Amino acid sequence: MHAPKYQALEIEAKWQSRWEASGLYATQRDETRPKHYALTMLPYSSGDLHIGHWYAMVPSDAKARFMRMNGYNTFFPIGFDAFGLPAENAAIKHGIHPHKWTLANVERMRGQLRQMGAMWAWDREVITCLPEYYVWTQWFFLKLLDMGLAYRKFAPVDFCPKCNTTLAREQVWGDDHHCERCETPVIKRDLNQWCFKITAYAEELLSGLDQIDWPERVKTMQRNWIGRSEGAQVTFKSEEGDPIVVFTTRPDTLWGATFMVLAPEHPLVEKLTTAEQRPVVEAYRAQAAHQNEIERMAVDKEKTGVFTGAMAINPVNGQRIPIWTADYVMMTYGTGAIMAVPAHDDRDMAFAIKFGLEIIPVIKRPDGLAKSAVDIAALREPSVFTAWLDEVHIAYADTGSELQVSLQGDAEINHYITQLRQQMLPGTYACVAGSRFAFVYADATINLDSFANASAILIRCRAANPTAREARTAFELLAGNSFYADVLMDTAMGEMMHSGTFTGTPGETAKSAVIDWLAEQGLGKPEVNYRLRDWLISRQRYWGCPIPIIYCDTCGTVPVPYEDLPVLLPDDAEFMPTGESPLKYHAGFRDTTCPKCGGPAHRETDTMDTFLCSSWYQYAYVSPYHKGETPFDRADAAYWLPVDQYTGGVEHATMHLMYTRFFTKAMRDMGLVDFDEPMLKLFSQGMILGEDNEKMSKSHGNVVNPDNYVSTLGADTVRAFLMFIGPWELGGSWSSTGIEGLNRFINRLWTMMLEPREAPTQVPGDADIAALRRITHKTIRSVTDDIKAFKFNTALAALMQLNNYMIKARESDVFGTPAWDEAQRTMVLLIAPLMPHVAEELWERLGGVYSVHQQNWPVYDPELAADELVTLVVQVNGKVRARLQVSPDITEESARAQALANENVQVFMNGRSPKKVVYVPGKLVSIVV
RNA sequence: GCCGAAGUGGCGGAACGGCAUACGCGGUGGUCUCAAAAACCACUGGAGGUUGCUCCUUGUGGGUUCGAAUCCCACCUUCGGCACCA
């Protein structure tokens, strides 16, 4: 007699239909039990469930099943993100209507999803392209418009020439600014576009991250994306009196502002430019505008810019400074104008050096480092000077032509300058740079602390040295010597200098002290800036949710009244390969009447970014296609929301995960929900790679089709393998031999559970029973902890160990004992979340009542799981020299005595007596001799 | 350049202050077979050896500790994100 063979396909088909027929996964509100809303990111209805979907969904399902067995009323819904360009492309290519194509795909994917054996709540499925769904997407648009969170503007926007549509900023990826979907580099276009004011929630989107249990990497990405900067707004004035407002994060460097830069698109450029400079400025602006049209320039391109001819007045010291325009200043961030402080900003430094603009350091290096290069020919008696340097222990190098001196701290610098001057020949000069910037002459020392001194320095140095005549600024005399390279610029928060009454203000308080003073003087105010941009939602495509807006010649932009929703997509649009949306040419859709005046009007023909559909889908699931005043049933929402555990790919960190947080905050403000964050916990899985460790793609030829494996080895094997690959958050590579190993495991498990055996004739020993129960309870403990922490790979490893143990144990006398039965039942319960079909079949064959998935998760008994003997490691001088099998409650004295008595330990102690003995109960004895 | 993650046998990985290499893959030998596959059993980090043993080994170099894959510092490599954001 042998066990029946493990027939995966038969078992899986049988249980899938039984689960469905018995409504095992139907959703039920149950106020008596704690709820758990588990959610995996909804798939796009591509028509094919690929291995990446399996990799994302299977562990998510396993965790949901685990929660269910732990007493939670668990909701694990599924649906389809069904709008989007692929459907439209299919329509153009194959002449199939996107609606038909999409629904056929959904039907196919439903079948594939069923094969996965997940506990999907099919009764709450949503498909985002159905009017019953998108009526609410449109409703949200109107609500946001009512709240002032939606607006239309004409501006240059990112446009994908392949998809023929605009994109939101966060949908443009990488160095080459390519389309997130098709990887084509984007171009800029000036268009009228609808935007959502996500920036209105910038501060809350940032601070809310502290309240949610999300992976740090995702939170960090969102923080960087939001890009909060604290600083001040400061108003400069042109000589003619035009206010020029700048944003700066370093108001403490204001005294070092030696020029200003306006973005080429800045409106003031036109006004400020002098007649003389107008031709070059106009040429530059034209070129900058043109560069926007074509591909973006290389990242580390040489800085460019032109002088406008105008001068500004630095409000803190009255200094006249030139106003330039350059494309390194962006019109879209801050005010589009900056004060340039080249001494403490590397971009301004590069620009100043290139164009010969003055540089005045105003912050002292916190490290006190200074350097000085002295021309040996400038010294009376070089040997006397070097002897002095040696005597006072000042480090220097002699290059043959100059002494390169390194100095530390004010006292040393001052002492050095005094000595140096005595040694210098008249008509020569030397410099000090770093913690102090000074030019030293036999008869004077001049600090580089103001425009006036800068010119004085330049005049004297030019007179002293013919090569200095080429220098345009005093600073350039330093920049020309590579010895100074690391002390020329410093961006640290240091003590202020050369800054009037603020001189001496320490770095820690400088920023706030200056901001307070600016506000008092009416010169500026505190200001926070964000890198985050508003969400551009218009898409020039057909297959999306229509934007419910009507344009009327008399009434202007008119929202479609709520009662007229939904604005339906016409089904008779013509799909031509023109690259333009068919809606634009569909008279029946486009031409309408104004809801206000009844006159002729036309509809908005752009549709919405599909990320809108997925921004609120988790709310739709609680009561799909809701009919009523709100997008979902309030009682259902109150019970299920918010999502307790979300899982999905990290690629959505700054897109979907940002959008849905924004939606939730807006929904709270419209009174729909009473919480601030949509998903309390998030787990971001890694990516599954091909067998060659490369990203799966058709061009690599390494794409794995899950259906091939599901139809031969069965879904449970595929599930188990995907979870066994490695830590879920790190992703991993497919392995065609690796999956065989998991199939082998299930087969061995099957045989171990079901292979008949005659009852043993001997009574088993107590120790054998205890050992079996010990590993059983230990396994419960580790599998429970591992699944809680999403460590499915180690959970499976623990189950394999139990299986290996039981395979041997079943040959012994413990077979058939209550301990054996306990081990078998436990095994089935523990595998249930991971391999739901095998578990159900084994459960039935063991005589369990339907269904294993409705059983309680086993609880381990710490006493049974406790080790009877532990291995005590004995180290001599940090090296393992012996291992003792001892009872875990051994006394310290006894442990020490046994350790010292060990033969091998004595060999390594070599007759010496222990200096120190470290005892860690249950772990080790460490002897130091 | 900045931020984040990761570097452990032939491979995926485990351990995350206390027995390095759990579990799986692959490999070697064996059982079964006319033979092969499957299945099962044994071995499998490297070097040495008198085989109930030693030395070496967790990207590199330092440090802390009785003890470091694990903690600290510096560096190298790979991957991901951001990048002229004032």
Image: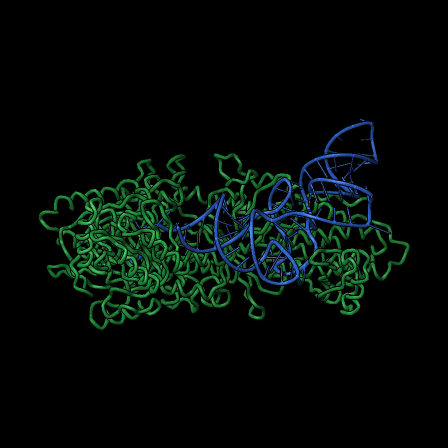
Question: Is residue A914 something one can see in this rendering?
Answer: yes
Residue that appears at 18% across and 60% down: A244
Q: Quadrant of the N terminus of chain A?
A: top right
Q: How is the image coloured?
A: by chain
Compare residues A153 and A695 and report the one nearer the observer: A695
Q: Colour of chain B?
A: blue
Q: Position of residue B4 (x, y in %)?
A: 47, 55
Left or right of A621, for residue A324: left
Instruction: Give the total of numbered labels.
Output: 0
* Residue A571 left/right relative to A789: left
Give how far across and how far down residue A125 sits, in percent: 49, 54
Q: Residue at x 14, y 59 (%)?
A: A238
What color does chain A have in the rendering? Answer: green
Q: Quadrant of residue A874?
A: bottom right
| Residue A561 in view of the camera | no
Location of residue A811 in the rendering, given as x and y in whole percent from the top left corner: 83, 50
Q: Residue furthest left?
A: A275
Query: Compared with residue A811, is residue A863 higher up or lower down, i.e. above or below?
Result: below
From the viewer's side, name the closer residue of A862 and A499.
Answer: A499
